[in-house]
Each structure stands twice: as structure tokens, then as C-alpha cells.
Image: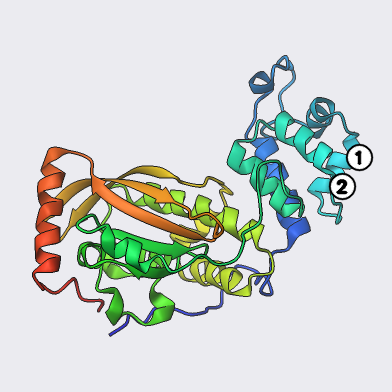
């Protein structure tokens, strides 16, 4: 049985018509990144008079990036400009963007930044690899966070995935909206915030993906928590990390996870969980025994 998750809704958010409004998002992203910086962050002297707005002034960004003030204004007003790679690099440096934010900026402007490549043909199924990773919990997700393969240990640890309708097998959708995950993470907001920052990078890289845009709109319309964190415009692709879980059967456990991307299929990720401490290792061993022993996973109700 699947959860009756909201599929749409009226609200305060303007619908994105199935694709990314690139000019608007580029404008808002640049403005948000300008406003988070103080003059001392970029080596500029503090001005004596009180600033009316937070962050750097447009004039200061223009000076740092070597472009005109009018150009910065037009970019932040979303007038449809498409900056060159050189200008994007200059803006990225001026705004002290991280590597992920730099890539996000290039994606919005429809340029491929150095070191990035487009996805090739779809790789062979990773299902056998996922099964071979037992007893470690493992699953494969795509760029939309849809769960496309898993082993019994991951299903037992998280949720009985086969019971869910296919359109609900999405890690971020479950984390944000499914009641079983309301208290599942010890630091829920951090987990969701990191997931959203990762999702935003995929969203910008695929502006024509209507299914991805629909997922973002569905989450924004259905969850004030998601909507608030989405507006932060954080961008970060997670390759590894830790999570504190509070499992209803085995109790608290600390998980370290790794995210692997197969060559030729950058749209898919293999996620592997392992114990972060000795106590959690014992509990993951319990998970493996229960999963292989046929004990039912948590019901998706």
C-alpha cells in the first residue's frame, strides 16, 4: 500500500511550467551569492557609512569581476543575458563560489565548465552489483533521486520499497513527506538541506527535464520545510558523509555513506552504507540477519 502523498496543490509558489526559468534563476542565484558576502570576505575595505542592503554592492562585484556595473544589474534583473565562460569564471571568482556552485552557474548559463562532461549512454544495470554488496545496505538512485535498485538490507533498513508505488520510490520525496521518516534521522534538517542542495545542481543541469521540475514543484507545494530550504539556493553534490539514524527496530545507529557514479552514466549513483562505529556495526549485522532471514521490512503504509 502506498502513501497518499500530495501530487499538486495551490499555494504561494509560481509554477515553473515544467522547465527551469534560466534567466530568473541565474539572476536570483547571483543576487543571493552577492548578498551573502561582506567586503572583508573579498579583501575590500569596510565603508564607514551604513549599508542599506546586506552583502556586497553591485559596484563591488563589477569591480572584482572586471565587468560593468550595468552588466551586473542586467544579469540580476534577469534580462536574458547569456554570459560567456570567461565572464562566468570571473563572477565565480568574485563571488567566491564553491566548485559545486561554479558548476551550477555554468549549467544555468548552458555552458559546460572545465572538467565536466555530459552523460554518455546508459550503463548496464547495476542491480547485480547492488546485490553483491550485501550485507552492506546499498541502492541505486538516478538524478531525480528515484530509487531504481536496492538490496534486501537497504529495504529492511529504510522501507519496504516493493510495496510503494513506483512514483513514490524517491529518497527525497520519502524523507520530506513520508511519516515513517519524520523521526528517522537524528539531524533531519541537515539531511534534507544536503539533499536539496544536491537536487538543485541536477535541476539546473537538466532544465528540460519536466519530471524533475514536477518533482521540485510537488515538494515545494507540499512541504513548507522543503520550500524554505529550497529558497536558500544552496548547491552541493555529496560524495560521502555520515548520517545518524533512529531506527524503530534496532535503535540509534551511525552510518557512513559513499556515493559512486559509474563511468558513462553520470545520471545514476550507487549509494553504499556502512557502520561509522562499533556499536552501529553490530546493529547493521542485525539488519543483515533480519533481511536475509525473511523478517518483513517496515511497511510502507
19 w.r.t. 72: above or below: below
Picture quadrant of residue 176: bottom left
Determine whether label 1 and label 2 are within 8 Å by CB.
Answer: yes
Quadrant of the image containing the C terminus: bottom left
Q: Is residue 144 left or right of residue 97?
A: left
User: Label 2 crowding class (10 Å Cα cut-off): few <14, some 14-19, many 20+?
Assistant: few
- Give me the residue at 49% from left, 68% from top: 219
Picture quadrant of residue 20: bottom right
Q: Secondary structure at mark 2?
A: helix
- Give me the residue at 65% from left, 48% from top: 104
Return the residue found at the far bottom. Answer: 1
- Give me the residue at 53% from left, 57% from top: 199
Q: Secondary structure at mark 1?
A: helix
Residue closer to the observer: 84 or 1: 84
- Residue 32 location (% of width, % of height): 66, 43
Q: Is residue 73 left or right of residue 180?
A: right
- Give me the residue at 88% from left, 35% from top: 69
- Residue 278 location (% of width, % of height): 13, 39
Residue on which the image places disc 2? 74
Q: Is residue 79 left or right of residue 167?
A: right
- Residue 28 location (% of width, % of height): 70, 50
The tag on residue 15 is: none
User: Label 1 crowding class (10 Å Cα cut-off): few <14, some 14-19, many 20+?
Assistant: few
246 w.r.t. 278: above or below: below
- Residue 170 location (% of width, % of height): 41, 69
Quadrant of the image containing the N terminus: bottom left
- What is the C-alpha distance between the residues marked 1 and 2? 6 Å
Q: Would you say residue 249 is visible in this rendering?
A: no
Number of numbered callouts drawn: 2
Residue on which the image places disc 1? 70
Q: Would you say residue 33 is visible in this rendering?
A: yes
Amino acid at each position: 500500500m502506498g502513501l497518499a502523498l500530495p501530487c499538486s496543490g495551490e499555494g504561494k509558489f509560481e509554477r515553473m511550467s515544467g522547465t527551469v526559468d534560466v534567466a530568473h534563476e541565474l539572476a536570483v542565484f547571483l543576487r543571493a551569492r552577492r548578498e551573502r558576502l561582506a567586503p572583508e570576505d573579498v579583501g575590500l575595505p569596510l565603508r564607514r557609512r551604513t549599508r542599506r542592503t546586506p552583502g556586497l554592492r553591485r559596484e563591488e562585484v563589477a569591480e572584482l569581476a572586471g565587468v560593468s556595473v550595468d552588466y551586473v544589474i542586467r544579469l540580476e534583473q534577469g534580462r536574458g543575458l547569456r554570459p560567456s565562460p570567461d565572464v562566468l569564471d570571473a563572477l565565480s571568482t568574485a563571488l567566491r563560489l564553491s566548485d559545486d556552485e561554479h558548476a551550477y552557474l555554468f549549467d544555468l548559463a548552458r555552458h559546460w565548465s572545465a572538467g565536466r562532461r555530459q552523460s554518455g549512454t546508459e550503463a548496464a544495470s547495476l542491480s547485480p552489483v547492488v546485490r553483491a554488496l550485501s550485507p552492506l545496505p546499498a541502492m541505486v538512485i538516478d538524478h531525480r533521486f528515484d530509487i531504481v535498485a536496492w538490496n534486501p538490507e537497504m529495504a529492511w533498513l529504510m522501507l519496504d520499497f516493493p510495496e510503494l508505488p513506483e512514483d513514490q520510490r524517491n529518497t527525497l520525496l520519502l524523507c520530506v513527506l513520508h511519516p515513517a521518516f519524520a523521526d528517522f534521522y537524528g539531524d533531519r534538517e541537515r539531511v534534507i538541506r544536503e539533499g536539496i542542495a544536491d537536487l538543485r545542481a541536477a535541476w539546473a543541469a537538466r532544465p528540460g527535464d519536466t519530471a524533475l521540475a514536477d518533482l521540485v514543484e510537488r515538494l515545494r507545494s507540499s512541504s513548507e520545510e522543503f520550500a524554505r530550504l529550497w529558497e536558500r539556493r544552496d548547491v552541493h553534490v555529496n560524495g560521502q558523509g555520515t548520517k545518524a539514524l533512529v531506527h524503530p527496530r534496532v535503535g540509534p545507529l551511525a552510518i557512513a555513506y559513499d556515493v559512486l557514479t559509474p563511468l558513462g552514466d553520470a545520471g545514476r549513483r550507487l549509494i553504499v552504507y556502512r557502520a561509522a562505529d562499533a556499536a552501529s556495526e553490530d546493529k547493521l549485522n542485525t539488519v543483515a540477519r533480519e533481511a536475509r532471514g525473511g523478517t518483513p521490512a517496515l511497511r510502507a503504509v
